[in-house]
Image (cartoon, helix red, strand yellow):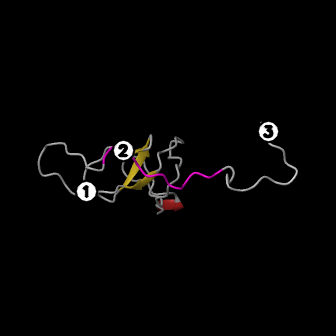
């Protein structure tokens, strides 16, 4: 989304409106922001810090002055992709290759 003069439109708080991806990105101040993923409870895009969803409010407006966090806050976030294997343990060694130990 762009504003006047084709510059990125800045939302309140200085954040730019960008497509949500699983990658970290640079903010307008040049500091990397946390990657965002969908909360399994409220389905909002929430920052993932240290492998957990950041604390956040449930969707909708509050009707009381109590602070209530979404039940999905601080849950462990699932990994984006499975870890790659360095080698296949079932694959036989290449002919001529000697074991290291």
First to last magenta residue range: 73-85
The residue at 85%/54% (across/down) is 95
Could you tell me residue 53's position as x and y percent? 37, 47
In the rendered image, the vertical position of residue 68 relative to residue 37, given as above or below: above
Q: Which residue is at the front of the view, 22 or 64?
A: 22
Q: Which residue is at the front of the view, 38 or 98?
A: 98
Few, some or many C-alpha atoms within 10 Å of disc 1 (few <14, some 14-19, many ≥20)? few
Could you tell me residue 96's position as x and y percent? 88, 50
The residue indicated by pointer 3 is 100
Magenta segment includes 11:
no
CA gap, disc 3 to disc 1? 57 Å
Could you tell me residue 71's position as x and y percent? 25, 49
Q: Nearer the viewer, mark 1 or mark 2?
A: 2
- Nearest to N terminus: mark 1 or mark 2: 2
The residue at 52%/43% (across/down) is 32
The residue indicated by pointer 1 is 59
CA gap, disc 1 to disc 2? 14 Å
The answer to whether 69 appears left or right of 96 in the picture is left
Few, some or many C-alpha atoms within 10 Å of disc 2 (few <14, some 14-19, many ≥20)? many
The residue lying furthest to the right in this view is 96
- Nearest to N terminus: mark 3 or mark 1: 1
Name the mark on residue 54: 2
The residue at 19%/55% (across/down) is 61
Name the mark on residue 92: none
Mark 3–mark 1 CB contact (< 8 Å): no
Magenta segment includes 79:
yes
């Amino acid at each position: 989304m762009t504003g006047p003069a084709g510059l990125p439109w800045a939302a309140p708080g200085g954040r730019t409106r960008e497509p949500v991806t699983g990658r970290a990105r640079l903010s307008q101040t040049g500091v990397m922001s946390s990657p965002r993923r969908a909360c399994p409870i409220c389905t909002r895009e929430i920052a993932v810090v240290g492998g957990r969803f950041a604390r956040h409010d449930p969707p909708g407006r509050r009707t009381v002055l109590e602070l209530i966090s979404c039940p999905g806050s601080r849950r462990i976030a699932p990994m984006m992709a499975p870890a790659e294997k360095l080698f296949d343990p079932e694959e036989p060694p290449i002919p001529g290759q000697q074991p290291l130990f």
